[in-house]
Image (cartoon, grey):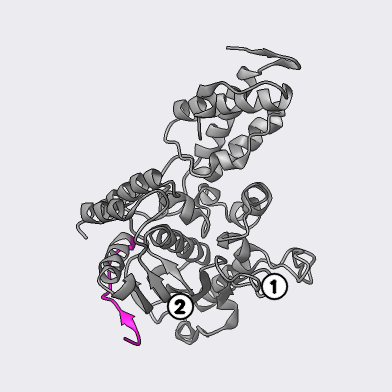
């Protein structure tokens, strides 16, 4: 749901589009050599790990100007796009409020939404 | 005990469990010169996956990092997803490191760049950043390509200094009395069978918090070098001049640690 702040409306659609594009890039193509086979150490333990999330945060920043700190991604890992969106959109909303509406306080449920 | 040499184990999690079992019964749960070999570090068994899942659950409850995050400090597996080594050699430094850099424990950046006394990235004669991991891998690849089908294969200079990576930085790390990099040195060797061996040296190794993720990261680093150089992956040897098993971790108290170890059959 779009939220209007002092300096604009939370660009949820753009955030979601950036996440979806990032997911597509991160999970595209053949995985590393050896991975894909059962029992390879090169198999990622999760589809998108903390580094993948860092690239997603950069993509969100580039698309919307919302700068989510990397500490939010430190221990993150996602196996599906829905969970990634479900966690990153509230974070983007939280930091949108902080950065675009300096005096706004984040919602309590936003504060709990770690990546 | 001058050297605590454990039995060979087939996989990273088996090695981790064996080391914990050993440390658990040592005085003060620590020892010097712990050494062991993972015979097939390229594999990830279902038992490994189960152990990692258990650890991740425990680490989350303790407020500590999961295996993936720890492993990523040694080798960023997501950068190699498309088997594009440039995403490791340069992509990590440009896309990831500026956003995750910390003063402690980020080993892969030390392997990908060298810094001078001012902390500036050192540049080679060709004008590009000095990249020790890339140099090592490319040199190893040249060796593999040059020796194919010939008996000179067995004369590879396995003690060549370019096969060594030091992660201890005497400028950046000189002030540490605590903290600082625990992983000090990586040594790659080609054995007589043409397999790539890796020996990792830890000046200090924490077995509850870090070792499982470290082992996964080291095995992935070895897999990357072997793949890029075109050689099979051989054993992974780990030597820790000091190793300890923490009695508590983060928000996990001693009783929680005991319960976790019991759940692993330790």
Q: Chain of mark 1?
A: B
Q: Chain of mark 2?
A: B
* Residue at 76% over, 17% down: A7
Closer to us: A26 or B139: A26
**Rendering coords of residue B145 (x, y %):** 53, 72
**Label 1 sits on residue:** B171
Nearest to N terminus: mark 2 or mark 1: 1
Left or right for B229, reference B127: left
**Label 2 sits on residue:** B190
- The relative height of residue B2 versus residue B230 in the rendered view (above or below) is below
The Cα–Cα distance between marks 2 and 1, rounded to whole angstroms, is 31 Å
Closer to us: A104 or B152: A104
**Which quadrant holds residue A96?**
top right
- Which residues make up the magenta segment? B1-12
For residue B92, say whether it is visible: yes
**Rendering coords of residue A26 (x, y %):** 53, 39
Quadrant the N terminus of chain B occupies? bottom left
């Amino acid at each position: 749901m779009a939220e209007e702040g002092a300096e604009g409306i939370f660009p949820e659609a753009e955030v979601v589009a950036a996440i979806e594009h990032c997911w597509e890039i991160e999970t595209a193509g053949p995985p590393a050599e050896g991975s894909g086979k059962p029992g390879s150490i090169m198999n990622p333990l999760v589809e998108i790990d903390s580094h993948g999330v860092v690239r997603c945060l950069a993509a969100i920043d580039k698309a919307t100007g919302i700068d989510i700190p990397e500490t939010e991604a430190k221990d993150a890992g996602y196996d599906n796009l829905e969970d990634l969106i479900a966690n990153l959109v509230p974070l983007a909303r939280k930091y949108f409020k902080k950065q675009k509406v300096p005096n706004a306080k984040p919602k309590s449920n936003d504060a709990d939404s770690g990546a | 005990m001058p050297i605590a040499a454990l039995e060979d184990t087939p996989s990273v999690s088996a090695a981790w469990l064996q080391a914990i079992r050993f440390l658990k019964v040592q005085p003060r749960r620590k020892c010097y010169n712990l050494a062991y070999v993972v015979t097939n570090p390229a594999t990830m068994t279902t038992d490994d996956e189960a152990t990692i899942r258990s650890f991740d659950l425990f680490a989350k409850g303790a407020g500590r990092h999961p295996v993936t995050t720890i492993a990523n400090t040694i080798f960023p597996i997501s950068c190699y997803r498309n088997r594009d080594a440039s995403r490791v050699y340069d992509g990590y430094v440009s896309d990831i490191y500026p956003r995750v850099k910390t003063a402690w424990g980020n080993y892969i950046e030390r392997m990908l760049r060298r810094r001078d006394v001012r902390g500036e990235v050192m540049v080679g004669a060709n004008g590009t950043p000095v990249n020790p991991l890339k140099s090592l891998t490319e040199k190893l690849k040249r060796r593999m390509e040059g020796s194919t089908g010939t008996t000179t294969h067995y004369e590879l200079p396995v003690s060549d200094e370019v096969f060594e990576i030091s992660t201890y930085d005497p400028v950046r790390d000189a002030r540490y009395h605590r903290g600082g990099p625990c992983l000090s040195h990586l040594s790659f060797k080609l054995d007589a069978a043409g397999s790539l061996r890796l020996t990792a040296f830890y000046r200090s190794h924490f077995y509850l918090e870090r070792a499982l993720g470290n082992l996964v990261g080291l095995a992935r680093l070895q897999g990357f070098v072997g793949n890029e150089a075109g050689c099979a992956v051989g054993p992974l040897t780990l030597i820790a001049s000091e190793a300890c098993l923490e009695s508590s971790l983060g928000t996990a108290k001693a009783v929680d640690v005991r319960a976790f170890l019991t759940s692993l059959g330790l």
